[in-house]
Image: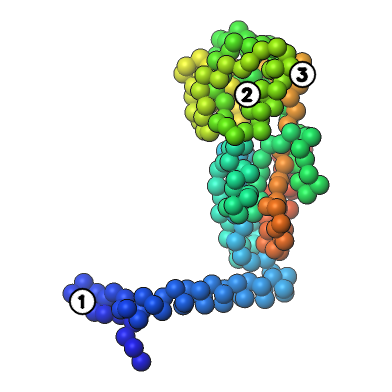
Amino acid sequence: GGALFTRHGRGVHLSELGQWTLPRVQAWLAHTEQLANDIRSGSGVPIGEVRIGTMPSTVRPLLCPVLARAKVLYPLVRISVREALDSQMDEGLNSAKFDLAIRYLNPQNLKSSDRVLRRVDSFLVGPIGDKVTRQKTVAFSALARLPLVLPCRPSVWRDNLDSLARAQGFSLHVALEADSLAVQKEMVMQAGMHTLLGPMALQPEWDGKLLQASKIVDPVLPRVMALTLRGGLVETLAQQVIAQLIVETATTMAARR
């Protein structure tokens, strides 16, 4: 019998009773929605939210086709997407910002729950006309003394590169740290720096002849594009079907190449 709203000249606002009631109503609605989701999932209908963390380089060729298919096949599934670099993936998974993560991993770091999407090589990327990257391959030792733009720490990728450099008797010269794929590529094009990227991250600048790239050898630096589940996650039906779409789309991409 109490008033939830108080009227004024420009409309209404919550009364004290309304302010007290609001969070309880919101919690009740959320519980009711989850109950409905559980019931529908129990009947075999995927429903609910799936939070995906993805590398910027995979958004256009891989994730956007997945989102388009999911909209048609699973209209009751809500998908949220956040771009993240290597240094941000673990934090996103550990804090439950992501349910699924599309990321690069060192082959030795793969877990049994990781789903391999693609195996790729690493490339040294330089500006057009760069002498170091004009051949198809380049030895890792060529990175000595090159001004590099690399992801910020903490980064497993950075740790691996530093370890390899020490084994060959030199230290990497990191001229700029940037957790931004766009910044990394622009600094190569505009400032004559170098960076290390996978083939998907090179597009479309490589096709447009705005960048040069050479496969790194001696040693090669293989990386695995993998789909990682959040630790301790019991997959919902919605998460299962979206994960399967990602795997299928990645397989189709590989077959086309």
- Helix, strand or loop under label 3: loop
- Badge 2: how crowded within 10 Å, few (<14), some, or many (20+)? many
Q: In this view, does 91 lie to the left or right of 121?
A: left
Quadrant in the picture for the N terminus? bottom left
Query: Does residue 205 sit above or below 193 in this rendering?
Result: below
Residue 92 % position (x, y): 59, 48
Residue at point 55% right, 20% down? Answer: 174
Residue 150 % position (x, y): 57, 26
Mark sitting on residue 196: 2
Residue at point 58% right, 13% down? Answer: 146
Query: Does residue 88 sit above or below 175 in this rendering?
Result: below
Residue 229 % position (x, y): 70, 51
**Which residue is outermost to the left?**
9
Kindly identify the amino acid type of the residue bearing the numbered disc 1: His
Q: In this view, does 23 lie to the left or right of 47?
A: left
Query: Which quadrant of the figure has residue 181?
Result: top right
- Badge 1: how crowded within 10 Å, few (<14), some, or many (20+)? few
